[in-house]
Amino acid sequence: MKKILIVDDERDIVECLDMNLRKKGYATAFAYDGTEAVLTARRERPDCILLDVMLPKISGIEVCHLLKADQATGHIPVIMLTAKGEEDDKVTGFDAGADDYITKPFGWRELFARIEVALRRSQPSAPQNQEDNALRVKDLAIYPDKYVVEQDGRRVDLTPTEFGILRVLAEHRGNIVTRNELNEALGITNNGGEIRSLDVHMRNLRKKLGDDIQECRYIETIRRIGFRVNE
């Protein structure tokens, strides 16, 4: 049974989420402020976190920063829940390492779909062979079964979405992967006027790999089309 950590300072929202998530078959844990959220995530190790932005003590953005910087919790997908819908708020959330962003009020079917996508992205893929299943791009070794990326032998900590982007591009190395194909493969939504979240995740991935957008050491941007791993 997958466990979802619900973080919101409004108890009626927590109770409503708890009831509906349990009906859907999930286990739940709760936190009502930012400090409690960090401690609960480290203790409970949930499979996904629903995180409100406006929290007492520590903001949801800072909570996300702290959890993603911690090796014990950095792999856990975080879905930001907030009534704030401006693009700048979404960019801030994605910069903090959030994997998805949904604006209140939301429909239950949409929320459950986003959770399922986040959970699928966070699961390691099946090994490609028994001896060396790594996807290799220059000095990068990408292990789909271990959910690990190493750069010249040193581990690089990525969010599930960042790992998914790199894995998909590496699987198609030498070929262009369109934006739509990446969004579809990763379950990234871009409804209406939402921020182009793929660009934010890509920017964070490049930063962690030390991949300057002008140099294109690993990932080449094909303007208006998509991306390609630079071999």
Image: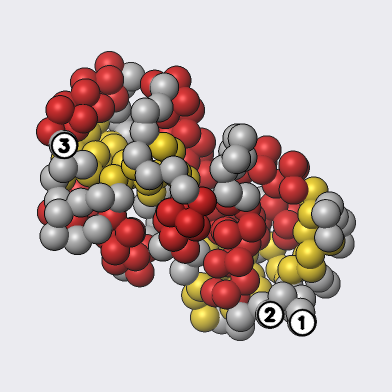
Residue at mark 1: 215
Mark count: 3
Question: Is the residue 46 above or below the residue 210 in the image?
Answer: above
Q: Nearer the viewer, mark 2 or mark 3?
A: 3
Q: Earlier in the sequence, mark 1 or mark 3?
A: 3
Say which amino acid is labelled 3: Glu
Question: Is the residue 169 above or below the residue 122 in the image?
Answer: below
Question: Is the residue 84 above or below the residue 210 in the image?
Answer: above
Q: Earlier in the sequence, mark 2 or mark 3?
A: 3
Residue 212's disc is 2
Say which amino acid is labelled 2: Asp
Q: Position of residue 128 (x, y in %)?
A: 67, 51
> Do residues under tags 2 and 1 come within 8 Å of each other at their CB atoms?
yes
Q: How is the image coloured?
A: secondary structure
97 sits left or right of 48 in the view: right
Looking at the rendered structure, the secondary structure element under dot 1 is loop
Residue 72 seen in the current view: no
Residue 10's disc is 3
Q: Position of residue 48 (x, y in %)?
A: 35, 43
Q: Residues within 10 Å of mark 2 (few under 14, many from 20)?
A: some
> Do residues under tags 1 and 3 come within 8 Å of each other at their CB atoms?
no
* Image point (69%, 62%), residue name: 135
Say which amino acid is labelled 1: Glu
Quarter location, residue 22:
top left
Front residue (pair 160, 58): 58
* Image point (74%, 48%), residue name: 179
